[in-house]
Image: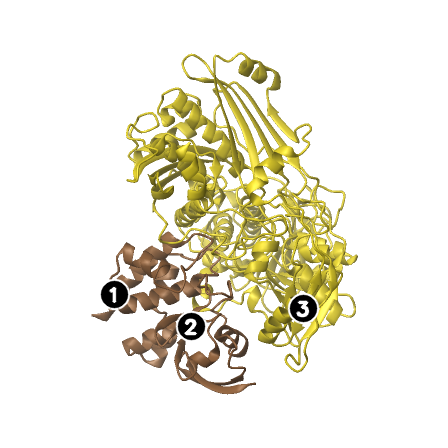
Amino acid sequence: MPDQLTLTVNGTKQTITTDPDTPLLFVLRNELKLTGPKMGCGMAQCGACAVLLDGEEIRTCVTPISDAAGKQVTTIEGLPAVWAAQKGLSATEAGKTLHPVQQAWIDEQVPQCGYCQSGMMVVAVQLLSKIPNPTVAQIKDAFTNTPPSPHLCRCGTYAAIIDAVQRAAHAMRGAGR
Amino acid sequence: MIGKTNQRETPVFAATISRRGFMKNGGVLLVSLALPVRFIGRAQAAENPTSMDPTLLGSWLEIRSDNTILARTGRTETGVGMTGYYAQTIAEELNVRPEAITLIMGDTDRTPDGGYSAGFLTGMSNLRKVAAYTYQALLGSASMQLGVPISALSVSDGVVSGGGKKISYGELVEGQHLELKIPVKGSLAKPDPAGWVGMTSLDGLTVTGDPPMTAPKEFKVLGTSFPAGHIPDKITGKTQWSCDLTLPGMLHARMVRPATLGSTLISAGAIDKKEFPTAEVVKRGNLLAVVSPNEWEAVQAALTVAGMTKWTEWSGLPGSENVGKAIRQYKWEKPGESRGKAASTMVALQNARKKVSATYEQGYVRHAPIGPFVAVADVKSDGNVTIWTHSAQSQGLRARMAYMLGIPVDKIVVRWMDQSGQYGRTTLGGDGAEADAVILSQLTGKPVRVQWTLDEDLAWSSVSPAWVSDMAAALDTNGHIVALHSAQYSPHMMDPRPLGALLAGMPAATSKPGNWVATEWPYDKIVNRLEDTYGMPNLAGDSANGGLRGNIMRTPGQRQQNFALEGLINEAAAAAGTDPIEYRLAHTTDERLINLLHATAKAANWEKRPSPHRGARRTSSIPVEGRGVCVMIRENAYWVGIAEIAVVPTTGAVHVTKFTIGVEPGKILNPRQLDRCMKSGVVMGLSETLKEEVTFDTKKVTSTDWNNYKILTMEETPEIKVMQLSRDDKGFGGGSEAANAIVPPAVTAAFFDATGVNARRLPLTPQYLVPLLKV
């Protein structure tokens, strides 16, 4: 039976009427038209659908929307606002800003097909919120062992991701203090 | 094409330019085809000089009065950076900034040439010539308008200067509708069940003639690390991928597949309308699906229906552990293709004092993108069909869908959108969810989106077939190879039949079972060589639904054959007691290969010595280290790979610690994109070398999730060192595709160096290696 559920997505409060077991991924993509998160395996084995729930990575393909009720969901569409809020930027400035992780992904030309990269950037944002200057070993651990499953990239962009995380870390430290 | 064809047309090399009319607002130079090729929409565009509507196919290239440039190509962005390369190519020949160029890619109704997107060379060649003809036409026009001879003109950033005067491209076309017709050959894909791959024209149209083009040593835009245009919108979530498309009234579909490959439908499960009020079962033959306007309802209802559906039993596969034996047991006749000197090679091998022979093999592997197949189709009641796809072969897909439906290709429009990587699986235009979507849309009368699941994709998409290679080399008293014979046996890898058509019992054309010699020979000092390749039909191909449908995968044919060839060269070097790089240098006079071997060896701090290493062990529980090398030549690009590994012999764990990859592809067109593609290619190659194999029992594929079809993770990725050599005097070659194929023979050579044992079957899993080391 459909329930009314309220959650905050990229800073906006959303009330959704749906079966509470509906995976959050379907709500984000089909109801809220936030198509950054992608359907990969549907079993929390790849990471293409990852978003931040109250700042922690979750796999939206296996997370019922009821688990997200009352919480903050952040997708890649919301990353610029996260950074703008962190930096206290004006609305005009915020509109022109990318999150340093996104900027690093462009500067390092990380994506090949790009299908997994929304999930990869989510990991990077979470990692840098905890470890501002990670080593290569810490980056590898964050993308492989810490999440529910290793984040998989079939194009093989792992080396570029490591470069981009380090670039973003540098930019965020420089911009921060 | 040369000479005036009427009073309004002026020749520009093999092209002609004419004024089609005047325009009150704006102006444009349209670059169109000289062949009478029919396109939907083209006629209207040509007759409507005020049309700047990019949805009408008017041109290959449009130079507009606002100095923007629109380019169209049937090729697509496959993830290797075509959106950057193509803009660079056009900008180079036109003398404009690449940022001025907008690309339309892959749509059958909006792009002129068709063809496949597996490599960038053929698509690039077309755009390069298109731009070169256009440049000459613009120079001619500027010469007339400025009253300055062409020889006195120069161009920078789209502004022509000469005789103290200047005019921009935009000003040149202001108020005019100009048309430049350029010569082409070939045709767009049409169904051809008797043809090579079940359709005509894998390549689409090719621009002919020889307009003056910029020499590589003069490149200003090519050769720089211009960024790929597709990236920023993918980073922010703005890109509309093919999986993101929604249409009014669209139904979401989930397929219900048979339990086994050769099964037929006995009875389909029913929907409980109380539980799933909007879901419906749709079927045609053995094609079964559940559709609903609500995706989650479709998912759940499909699971319920799948549990209630009954299929016949089938059991016809040999089991993946027996795949080599099954290939051996096929009644082989003569080779599909042979290259080299048969008689002298066989005599030399018979008379050899010393012979090195070995058999190399590999199980089935697959493309396995992170995003499973997805497609949307809208079949209208008037018979017009629109398909939204990520296929790398839009025109070919259109031909296959036309054949399936029994309608002319003109009734179908294929629109291309970004999606997960393909790695060759859609190059032939067949594999994918498009047939499912078309059939379901036809049955329901609504637009239908078909999203395959991962287990469906890993069980049902086409595969890169298993193979066996028998290799033999005759060595002289100095250990030098005097003759080499290779014989490779494999199910064919050109089966483009769409799964949906097969299950629904609709027409699907395939290719002849065959195999081809894919190596490019690096060792000109080996005088006697014979390369034989044998192809058979799909494994279990007599089953109703086609068994394991073989398909090409990144660096097809050459990836497999080079593993066997370079494996044997490494074994011969060891038999001769020679350093494997020295050994290769002794068998070639190719200066490009020699230079690259030296440069890559230096980059890897290669220590000159024979394999195995003095400390090699096959019994230790402490890691033993080894290093190995291999080479490859592909499409005017030279490759060298050097692997450094650590092996724990008691556990069979192989850890690649460093990989050095060297390339010399003539002129490097974009160093950063090449660097990225080389590193990611190494990751894919390591994944295949260490982990990947499609497993199946006698009934079905069993490796249907990421725990059972394992691919490399970030943690397993070694330090990758890239060595690029660029040169101006050898044109440019196939960029990055082959980076995956340079990995496997280097790793197995390093395994031998570490343990003294030859591992000749991929992948190098502990299950394979532990018993091998114990023998």
Quarter of the image where the C terminus of chain B is located: top left
Residue indicated by mark 1: A132
The answer to the question of whether label 3 and label 2 lie on touching residues, with beta carbons closer than 8 A, is: no
**Between tags 3 and 1, which lies in front?**
3
Q: Position of residue B216 (x, y in %)?
A: 45, 40
How far is disc 1 from disc 2 in space, using C-alphas?
21 Å
Task: Indicate left or right for B108 with A109 as reference.
Answer: right
Quarter of the image where the N terminus of chain B is located: top right
- In-front residue for pair B185/B118: B118
Q: SS for tag 2?
A: loop
Amino acid on which the number 2 mark rests in the picture: Thr
Q: Position of residue B66 (x, y in %)?
A: 52, 64
User: Which callout, 1 or 2, points at the residue further toward the start of the chain?
Assistant: 2
Q: Position of residue B189 (x, y in %)?
A: 70, 49
- In-front residue for pair B629/A44: A44
Q: Which chain is brown?
A: A
Amino acid on which the number 1 mark rests in the picture: Pro
How far is disc 3 from disc 2 in space, using C-alphas?
38 Å
Q: Characterize the local packing of mark 3: few (<14), some (14-19) or many (20 or more) Cα atoms within 10 angstroms.
A: some
Residue indicated by mark 3: B308
Q: SS for tag 1?
A: loop
Residue B280 lies in what quarter of the image? bottom right
Q: Which residue lies at the image location 42% right of the left edge and 33% below the top edge?
A: B630
Q: Chain of mark 2?
A: A
Q: Characterize the local packing of mark 1: few (<14), some (14-19) or many (20 or more) Cα atoms within 10 angstroms.
A: some
Q: Which chain is yellow?
A: B
Amino acid on which the number 3 mark rests in the picture: Met
Q: Among all residues in the image, which is located at the extreme left?
A: A177
Residue B498 lies in what quarter of the image? bottom right
Could you say which disc has been placed on residue B498 in the image? none
Residue indicated by mark 2: A75
**B754 above or below A148?**
above
